[in-house]
Amino acid sequence: MKNLSSKFRMVLVCLGMCMVIGMPALASSYNSTLSMSTDCWQFSGSTRKYSGKSIKMSMSLKRKVTQAGGNQVYLRASLYRKNLIFSDYVSYHNYDDFSGKETHKWVNVGSGKYYWSFEKKMPKNHDYYKYFVAFNSKNVKMYNY
């Protein structure tokens, strides 16, 4: 009887391990860097797969102003969902805190393939100021939750 009980436990443990190993991972996280020189005003990042319900992006953004007027420029991160042929715009967040880490959440966007488009923006229509600033971050983190 004791031998049967230990075999039964072993079968349960094996089944449990098979279920855990066979389940798809629900966590998707990516680390990256961001570098926009003075002559770049917009670019799009890589398309990445997220398996959770919501997505977060955090970074410590550094801004280097090269001429007067550049201190008004901030960085806009627009999130897009990639479909078979086209992409759907989800929403954006303005990163304008240059003193520390800033995090934004895109809530209830669902799982799928997404990418961000980064663009230098101004509060007024002085587009030429975009070329007076550079942005850098060595710790961009994108993950679902």
Image (cartoon, helix red, strand yellow):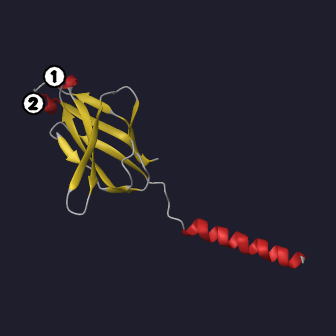
Disc 2 designates what residue?
128
Q: Are marks 1 and 2 in contact (CB under 8 Å)?
A: yes
State the image coordinates of residue 76 (x, y, percent, origin top left): 25, 36
Quick one: quadrant of the N terminus?
Answer: bottom right
The part of the image, by quadrant, that contains residue 141 is top left
123 and 33: which one is in front?
A: 123
The residue sitting at 13% across, 28% down in the picture is 129
Q: Is residue 43 above or below residue 126?
A: below
* Total numbered circles: 2
Mark 1, Cα crowd under 10 Å, few <14 / some 14-19 / many 20+, is some
111 and 120: which one is in front?
A: 111
State the image coordinates of residue 48 (x, y, percent, origin top left): 34, 56
The part of the image, by quadrant, that contains residue 60 is top left
Pointer 1 or 2: first along the chain: 1
Give the alpha-carbon distance from disc 1 to disc 2, as whole Å. Answer: 9 Å
Q: Amino acid at mark 1?
A: Gly
State the image coordinates of residue 68 (x, y, percent, origin top left): 16, 21
Residue 45's disc is none
The residue sitting at 16% across, 22% down in the picture is 69
Disc 1 designates what residue?
69
The residue sitting at 55% across, 69% down in the picture is 22
Q: Amino acid at mark 2?
A: Tyr
Q: Is residue 138 above or below residue 25?
A: above
Mark 2, Cα crowd under 10 Å, few <14 / some 14-19 / many 20+, is few
26 left or right, relative to 138: right
Residue at disc 1, secondary structure? loop
Residue at disc 2, secondary structure? helix
